[in-house]
Amino acid sequence: MTAPTPALPAKIDPLVRAFLDTPGAVAAALKRFGSPVHLVFPQVYAENLAQFRNALDQLLTQHRICYAHKANQSRAFVRTAARAGIAIDATSPQEVTSAIAAGFGPQHIEVTGPKGDVFLRDLIDRGLTINVDNLWELARIPELAGAHTEVPVLLRVSGFDDGQVSRFGVPLGHIERAFDLLAAHRDRIMFLGFAFHLDSGDTGERIRAIDACLALVERAYGRGLTPSVLNIGGGYRQVFTEDADQFDAYVHALRESLLGRGEPMSWGSNTFGYHVAGGAVHGIPVFHKYANTIPATRMLEDLFTAPLERHGGRTVAEVASDNLLDMWLEPGKALVDHAGVTVAMVEFVKEIADGSVLVNVDLSRDSVTPADQEVMVDPIILPRHGVSNETSPVGVYFAGRLCLERDLITNHKVWLSERPRPGDLVVFPNTGAYHMDLSAATASMRPPPIKLAVAHRGGAFHVCLDADYEPDPPIGPPQQHTPRRSPMPSEAP
Ligand SMILES: Cc1ncc(COP(=O)(O)O)c(C=O)c1O
């Protein structure tokens, strides 16, 4: 018996799986719209949202979900979010336009990230909530606001852990200057509360940030300000892998190969962030997020039921409720998890000087890879002429368009049950969050893949342009938010 080949099986949503398994369905979509394509599944998005919302309903008395639009440009997702009655986090004039076109009213649009003068002026004119990134923005708002305008503002803060430096937000050490501005311009600034976003999935780090913000709420009250919102940003993780043991086994084999043991498994001199020295592999790989097995809803549970030492061991949720704090969250990837795949076509397969096999598809790395990360889930082959009975496993690298030596789609080796043929389709799983859009460029003047929405209705799948998709009826009551001037928080430090 031969040993099983290393594998990185992807977790696939049942609806997506059903579409991929429907004979001829994917091929028909490509025949109609061309190849390659991004397929988005708004019903999977709606289901993710329902679960996320349900988890929050169980945990918090007041909350608001602001979908982080930057995760995907899909209009179908934004329409689905609007129809569900949640809010949206936009970061650019284009995302604001997209949100408004999808049906979001001004009171449901929050704008995050650094903004220039022109953008700020536009946000004030439109009456949107401004999540202020820095003291310049905070000082500029009252200058730009008309005499009778009260601009809703959240103050993003950063630098919660010792030595932590962020390019975003107002550092905690500068907070008094922010309080001075907020206190001096109460007639023009409606201070809703504090905000943060951590570029990390670590729950402990998030709890420390919440605790620091609760202390800021108390200090703000001391300055006569009345914050009622705590916006804890995004960062709720995705689960890519179907099988954590197989993932670990693959990574073990990869590390062995980096030490020269077994078959080579990486293209060129790639070490994926590992440091190889003294006969050992050290460090954390760039792809560590693909190993995660904890769903976003569990993260929410862990976060909001965590005890806060400074508050007598009461949980984050209890302290928020006692202080009448409205908890805002900005999930991006967690709502889009499993709601998108990318399909390309094999153009040719070639063997190169060292015997490596390259499967060339009509796609570029930047269309399925966010910020040059290595994506650690196996693509799925849909053979043009059906599955053959004979299997002859082959380890390959997926290559595609673009011209640099390192522009492979997979820099790690992928084992397939047999060598693909021209015309076979290749499905890249779970590309919805950032993979499709974050880094996509138009190098060589090639446009990015077209985006299609797939829905299951009346017992059949329907495929349309993403721009033409209309969601099903609402999945829940609209969220109400009236900015409140809440009473003093009950907590003493
Ligand atoms: C301010 C802000 N909020 C929310 C998000 C969404 O994060 P995620 O997709 O990890 O939930 C981001 C992502 O960069 C962000 O910068």
Image (cartoon, rainbow, N blue to C red):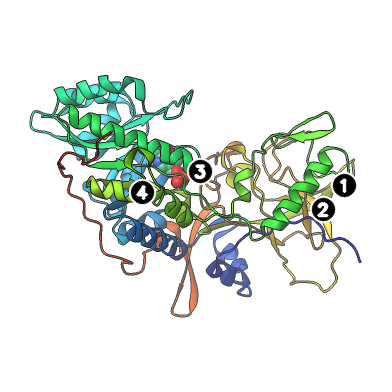
Q: Residue 342, how many percent across, how many down? A: 59, 55
Looking at the image, which is closer to me, 460 or 30? 460
What is the x, y in percent for residue 374?
Answer: 66, 43
Residue contact between numbered discs 1 and 2, judged by CB atoms under 8 Å: yes
The amino acid sitting under disc 4 is: Thr
Q: CA distance from mark 3 to mark 4?
A: 19 Å
Residue 433 picture location, percent across and down: 51, 50
First of labels 1, 2 by sequence position? 1
- Comparing labels 4 and 2, the label whose residue is closer to the camera: 4
Real-space CA distance between mark 4 and mark 2, rounded to the nearest whole angstrom: 50 Å
Disc assigned to residue 395: 2
What distance separates the C-alpha of mark 3 from that of mark 2?
Answer: 32 Å
Query: Seen from this angle, which residue lies furthest front?
Result: 312
Q: Between disc 3 and disc 2, whose residue precedes?
A: 3
Instruction: Point out the quarter of the image occupied by ligand 1.
Output: top left
- The residue identified by callout 1 is 263
Please give the name of the residue rendered at 82% of the width and 74% of the height, measured from the top-left corner: 389
Residue at the image point whose x is 29% and y is 52% from the top: 63
Label 3 within 8 A of ligand 1 by Cβ: yes
The residue that disc 3 covers is: 201
Q: Quadrant of the N terminus?
A: bottom right
Crowd rating for badge 2 (residues with CA inside 10 Å; few <14, some 14–19, many 20+)? many
Frontmost residue, 2 versus 211: 211
Residue 449 visible, this angle: yes
Q: Amino acid at mark 1?
A: Glu
Relative placement, left or right, of 353 versus 420 is right
